[in-house]
Image (cartoon, grey):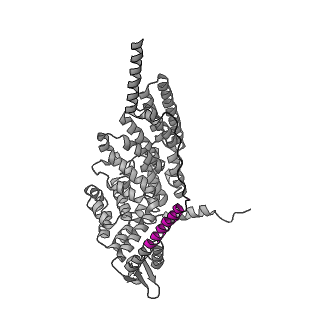
Amino acid sequence: MTSLGPPADASAQAAAIDEMLVTELPKFDLVLYIQNYSGRTRFDRLLLIGKSCIPLQVDALKAAIAEAKSGRDVSRYKQAWDCIRKLAPDEPEATRDEAWIDATEKSNKAETQRLESELKGYKNNLIKESIRMGNEDLGRHFEAIGKLNDATEAYSRMRQDVSTTKHIIDCGMHLANVSLYRRDWNMVLTNIGKITGVQSPDEEETLQSFVRLLSGIAHLNLGSYLEAAKNLLLTDFAVPPAQYNHVTSPNDIAVYGGLTALATMDRTELQRRVLDNQSFRTFLEHEPHIRKAVSLFVSGRYSNCLSILESYRSDYLLDVYLRQHVKDLYKRIRTKCIVQYFVPFSRITLESLDAAFGLPGESLEEELMAMIRNDFLNARIDARNKLLVAVQPDPRADMQRQSLKAAKNYERDATEHLRRISIISAGLEVLPGKVEKSGPPDEWFDERANMALMESMETEESAKVQEA
């Protein structure tokens, strides 16, 4: 039996992939862009650009293959090779390097056996510090060769042998980084919380920015944009990028923080938390268009703000953390712009709104209807006259509604009081019965009576002694 077509899930995934393909040349230079990163994120970003950006596909995949062969993770090399052999089979990199694969796998296997043998010896000697360091070395090895689940297990075994605050922080940082590479955002927040709870004042100064950065990225990918903005806006620019370039760059911090703030904060908060924030303004110097977009939104020039953001959409679709959230963030920012634009008016023509916010090939009227249904916009559409009319609150109706509610509450309370009085007058009230007490009488617990009893007993005993 022949299949009638791909399943619905596969079709949806294919449509999502096609929607995120970037056909325009991005505004950044690939070589300069990738120099801002190190570690696994460097390869991840190159591979994403190679899969998604049509003008830079071949160059990005070549760089990804070179990056993979500079490390020990064979699976990453196979991913990049599989992509380039389909896109550019005539390139030299499209030929699979079996010699490098065999040599690297053999070396990785030997190193794994050596580290496991050393760890076994440490366990036999019962030296806690050596066991902790052995698990740490094994975890770093698994992380380098791409076995992230095994790395998580090795780092987790470090917990039972930690002895200082620094060891606890190192263990939490390892687990947070591996969870980030695995895209397990809830575990990232969990491990960061454990680090924050044990930080000493000295460690807090050095790690606070990195903790906030990881928290911001995790909240961003969980859809908690306001929490992401709060954490990212508090990142300290004084921390050197070398401490976090295995995750992100100063340019990315400016973009993540600016977009999430635009999507969730009002104009007053944007002025106070973004534009007047001296530390974050230094990040914004790396991405001046984000600062300009925020300034335009605060000053009420909403259409210009949206046009600037739209011109950089293709760049943001090539970011490993921001890619899945560009559409939602842009939609939220656009909704806020339309709502704020309409605030000063009691009514406005749909033609003027379309001139300010209209998109080619899309109906603004349907977008306004969706905003009204979702309670983002308190207005109604006059389809006959092509007007958007604000719904003005009626103080008289509100007062009458509150009065009726108060009258109903009073009537309910009065009815309950009358019912209570009727039950008592009819003798139907159930009184609590007397509780029988067991144990010594109450006089036993009376200190004065107890002392008098003791004195009388002593007097009787002394009298008996004298008689004897």
User: Measured from the top left, where is residue 395 in percent x and y?
Assistant: 37, 78
User: Measured from the top left, where is residue 300 in percent x and y?
Assistant: 31, 73
User: Measured from the top left, where is residue 278 in percent x and y?
Assistant: 25, 57
Do we see residue 215 in this rendering? yes
Examine the image and state in which quarter residue 325 appears.
bottom left
Specify start and end residues of the magenta stretch as a single range.
405-428
- Compared across the picture, whether 290 is left or right of 187 comes to left
Instruction: Give the residue drawn at x 34%, y 70%.
Output: 305
Q: Nearer the viewer, residue 328 or 461?
A: 461
Do we see residue 242 in this rendering? no
236 vs 334: above or below: above
Quadrant occupied by the N terminus: bottom right
Q: Answer whether residue 427 is magenta in the image.
A: yes
Q: Nearer the viewer, residue 263 or 15?
A: 263
Q: Answer whether residue 225 is magenta in the image.
A: no
Instruction: Give the residue drawn at x 39%, y 17%.
Output: 462
419 vs 380: above or below: above
Instruction: Give the residue drawn at x 30%, y 66%.
Output: 268
Point out the residue furthest to the front here.
467
Point out the residue furthest to the top here.
468
Examine the image and state in which quarter residue 192 appears.
top left
Quadrant occupied by the C terminus: top left
- Compared across the picture, whether 162 is left or right of 437 comes to left
* Principal secondary structure, stretch drawn in magenta: helix
The count of marks equals 0
Examine the image and state in which quarter residue 4 appears.
bottom right
